[in-house]
Amino acid sequence: MSISQEFPDLPPLWALGTAVASVVVGRLVPIWSLPFPAFLLGAALIGAGLGLAAWAALWFRRKRTTIEPRETPATLIVEGPFRINRNPIYTGMTFVIVGIAMMAGTLGSLITAFAFPVIVTTRFIRGEEAALLSSFGAEAERYLARTRRW
């Protein structure tokens, strides 16, 4: 069995890997310690990120469409958090990762955390946007034009 079969290419795994890397880099390269309020802000970001991701996940369930990144969507969701952000689950994951990095307390952790948006944009979001255009045509085009990616 190949490693790609054992470890599926899914955003939550990339989020977990980025969060772990962020903490490890922070410990190995302790550049500039963040002040204590950063710890509290980090905790708040984690809570906000989990809440945002959960809210968005509920919309997938409500609209009876897939949450899996590489499956064909049955519905274009434009309500709830999707009104202002095309990727609220990824945004929520990013908030959690940045929150963990802030709680780790170093600039190295924080810098590493910002790898996740780059990874998820290149590995998932661009393909998801293409699938929306393919499935929903002009409706998706209008949605992509009026709603920010992040």
Image: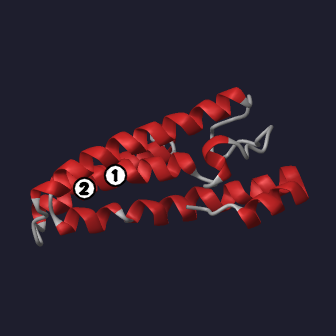
From the viewer's perspective, is residue 2 above or below residue 22?
A: above
Which residue in the structure is indicated by mark 2? 101
Q: Quadrant of residue 139?
A: bottom right
In x, y percent, where is residue 125?
A: 61, 58
In x, y percent, where is residue 124?
A: 59, 56
Q: On residue 52, which mark appears?
A: none
Which residue in the structure is indicated by mark 1? 97
Q: Are marks 2 and 1 in contact (CB under 8 Å)?
A: yes
Residue 1 appears in view: no
Which colour assignment does the render follow?
Answer: secondary structure
Q: Quadrant of residue 81?
A: top right
Measuring 15% from the left and 63% from the top, which residue is drawn there? 106
Q: Which element is circle 1 on?
A: helix
From the viewer's perspective, is residue 23 above or below residue 1?
A: below
Apparent side of residue 2 relative to residue 41 in the rendered image (left or right): right
Residue type at mark 1 is Ile
Measuring 29% from the left and 65% from the top, which residue is drawn there? 112
Residue type at mark 2 is Ala
Q: Which of these two is toward me, 24 or 100?
A: 100
Q: Which element is circle 2 on?
A: helix
Apparent side of residue 57 relative to residue 39 in the rendered image (left or right): right
In x, y percent, where is residue 131?
A: 76, 53
**Separation of disc 2 and disc 1 at Cα?**
6 Å
Q: Quadrant of residue 30?
A: bottom left
User: Could you classify mark 2 by the number of other residues whose Cα lies within 10 Å: few (under 14), some (14-19), or many (20 or more)?
Assistant: many
